[in-house]
């Protein structure tokens, strides 16, 4: 019986064993040291991305946030910009404020006064988000086509001027999704559309947006 119990315990432990896998990365992305070594006045523009507004007809809780998260990751992975955090800046400043409590070693806390300002601000809005915009039915979902459209504005932070504006449209019928800049799994807010035509349309839109921003000389 003792031997049998040990076998059961071993089986239970092995059954609970989990593995972790990196599902997304980019060969173009800089290392931590490289990102920190980038001069603030270098050739790369410092860019920040605001959470996208959702202006499509259908409900889309979390869609705007998910789209801006994907765009942020993708722009960073191009290694053509210095991407500065703005959406969750509060968490960074709170970490720096811990130095004021006197409970932490001063040589280990993040110093204040070294956050970098953005030169360019990306503002976006989702104006169309239709998982079934063409064809298909409840019975034949495989024939459906998904459509998405986003408006992008690049704003010069120094002057507040809009220096570039464009509309990006994509459908699941588009070919050639490169997935060079976007992570494998969809972020929170978009996860419900994984492995659907909508996922392909989302990735198409992000890739087109990244290529447009990277090609824009501002």
Image: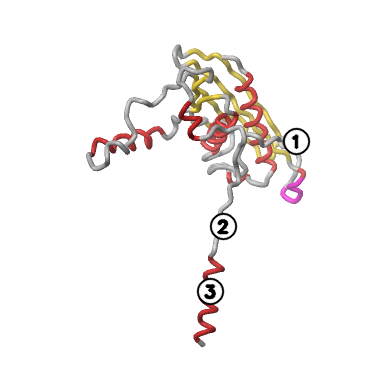
Q: How many marks?
A: 3
Q: Residue at x 64, y 22 (%)?
A: 212
Quarter-wise, where is residue 183 in the image? Answer: top right
Q: Secondary structure at mark 3?
A: helix
Q: Find residue 35 and report its horizontal and vertical position in percent.
A: 49, 30
Residue at numbered disc 2: 19
Q: Find residue 122 and report its horizontal and vertical position in percent.
A: 52, 24
Look at the image and say whether residue 182 sits in the magenta stretch: no
Q: Residue furthest left?
A: 102
Q: Secondary structure at mark 1?
A: loop
Separation of disc 1 and disc 3 at Cα? 50 Å
Separation of disc 2 and disc 1 at Cα? 35 Å
In the shown orientation, is residue 4 left or right of residue 208? left
Q: Which mark is residue 10?
A: 3
Q: Which mark is residue 75?
A: none
> Up-down: is 121 above or below 207?
above
Rate crowding at label 3 as few (under 14), some (14 to 19) or many (20 or more) other CA atoms within 10 Å.
Answer: few
Q: Secondary structure at mark 2?
A: loop
Question: Bounds of the magenta span?
Answer: 138-142
Q: Residue at x 50, y 28 (%)?
A: 83
Q: Main secondary structure of the magenta part?
A: loop
Residue at numbered disc 1: 173
In the shown orientation, is residue 19 left or right of residue 107? right
């Amino acid at each position: 019986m003792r031997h049998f119990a040990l076998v059961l315990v071993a089986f239970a432990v092995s059954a609970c064993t989990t593995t972790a896998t990196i599902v997304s990365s980019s060969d173009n992305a800089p290392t931590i040291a490289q990102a920190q070594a980038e001069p603030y006045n270098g050739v790369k523009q410092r860019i920040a991305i605001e959470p996208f507004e959702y202006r499509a007809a259908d409900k889309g809780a979390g869609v705007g946030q998910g789209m801006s998260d994907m765009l942020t990751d993708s722009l960073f992975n191009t290694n053509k910009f210095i991407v500065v955090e703005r959406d969750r800046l509060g968490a960074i400043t709170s970490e720096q404020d811990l130095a004021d409590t006197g409970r932490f070693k001063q040589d280990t806390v993040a110093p204040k006064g070294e956050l970098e300002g953005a030169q360019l601000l990306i503002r976006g809005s989702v104006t169309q988000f239709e998982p079934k915009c063409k064809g298909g039915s409840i019975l034949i979902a495989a024939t459906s086509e998904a459509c998405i459209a986003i408006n992008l504005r690049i704003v010069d932070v120094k002057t507040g001027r809009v220096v570039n504006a464009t509309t990006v449209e994509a459908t699941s019928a588009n070919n050639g999704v490169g997935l060079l800049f976007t992570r494998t799994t969809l972020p929170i807010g978009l996860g419900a559309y994984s492995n659907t035509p909508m996922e392909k349309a989302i990735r198409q839109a992000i890739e087109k947006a990244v290529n447009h921003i990277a090609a824009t000389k501002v």
